[in-house]
Image (cartoon, rainbow, N blue to C red):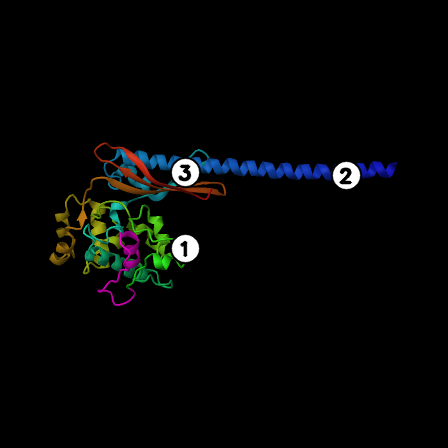
Amino acid sequence: MLVIVLCTIMLLEVLLLGFNFRCRNDLRAVDHLRRSIEALNCARAGLNMAIAAIRDNPDIHTDKGTLSLLSGENSVTVGPGECLITVSEESGKLNVNLLKDKTGKLDRSRIDRLLRLIDLLNREQTGQSDIGYGLVPSIIDWTDDDDEVTCLPFVTRENLGAESDYYGTLEPAYRCKNKPLEAVEEMLLIKDVTTDIFQRMRNYVTVYGDGKIRINSAPKVVVETLAEKMDTAVAAMIVERRKVKPFESVAELRDVPGVTDGIYEAIKNTVTVSGGNEYYHVESEARIDHLGCTIEAVLRRNPETKSVEVVFYKEHGR
């Protein structure tokens, strides 16, 4: 009888220990879920701050009230978490959807700028695999409406693109889109675009806008791609000049030391100081304790109606 009682007690202890262990795991899971939701809400709050700033300010990159908030250098306290907001203007980047003109002819000037971007990134990222020139005709083939493999006759090395015959051999197989990219992330589907290459190019290319480069917001690397004779020193001078006083007209570029007549003539029809519909890339990175959530979005601002719409939205790290 005593043995039965002892066995029963031991069995109850085992059941209680198991129940306690399960309850602890459930409580941890609930707490993890709660904090994940809080992190998501914190990131959403950061995105809403960016939307409000873009909606209420004609130029967020020159407005002193929003510059510190949107520079990516300062975090904002939102409830129990911290949120880092980074905004970049898409019109300050190279549009990879416009490597052919409306007639289907290769746009040599835009292609040359993308090739120069590749050279600059390869030069800066020593120790990493080079980005090949073949990426450019591959982008052209992905975005144009024909099934002919593009060959760039003015490029002496990798210069062949890819159509559905190539993508059909992959696992899983898929077809070449033959339409403009709807989001920059689609580049990961294109031949020769690895995750590493995409991350290196992401801040300098876009799929939005009319292709004009807004000189007041373009990264220095993009400024350097604008003309063959534009070197690092001249590009840096342009960036430093706009920090003091944003360019109010393209003609003001003539006053920047190092901008020769040749450079000005090469870029005057390529750049702008204002635009129509404006696109912004926003990253809102929230962190609560050890949990984080990042929202990536592209916003479109209509300067006439001042309305802001989300044209791309993606959550990371939930």
Apparent side of residue 229 relative to residue 78 in the rendered image (left or right): left
User: Which mark's residue is nearer the viewer, 3 or 1?
Assistant: 1
Whichever of labels 3 and 1 marks the residue nearer the N terminus, that label is 3
Residue linked to disc 3: 43
Q: Which mark is residue 173?
A: 1
- To which quarter of the image does residue 273 belong? top left
Q: Is residue 273 magenta?
A: no
Task: Kindly state the secondary structure of the residue where label 1 is placed.
Answer: loop
CB within 8 Å, label 2 to label 1:
no
Task: Kindly state the secondary structure of the residue where label 2 is placed.
Answer: helix
Residue type at mark 2 is Leu
| 284 and 112: which is toward the camera | 112
CB within 8 Å, label 2 to label 3:
no
Q: Main secondary structure of the magenta part?
A: loop
Residue linked to disc 2: 11
- Is there any visible trace of residue 107 in the rendered image? yes
| 216 and 138: which is toward the camera | 138
Find residue 288 and report its horizontal and vertical position in percent: 47, 39
Find residue 316 and report its horizontal and vertical position in percent: 43, 44
Q: Which residues are magenta?
A: 137-158
Task: Kindly state the secondary structure of the residue where label 3 is placed.
Answer: helix
Residue type at mark 3 is Ala
Q: Is residue 138 magenta?
A: yes
Gap between marks 2 and 3 measured at Cα: 48 Å
Relative to 227, residue 313 above or below: above
Number of residues whose C-alpha sits closer than 10 Å to that of mark 3, classed few (under 14), some (14–19) or many (20 or more): many
Gap between marks 3 and 1 measured at Cα: 36 Å
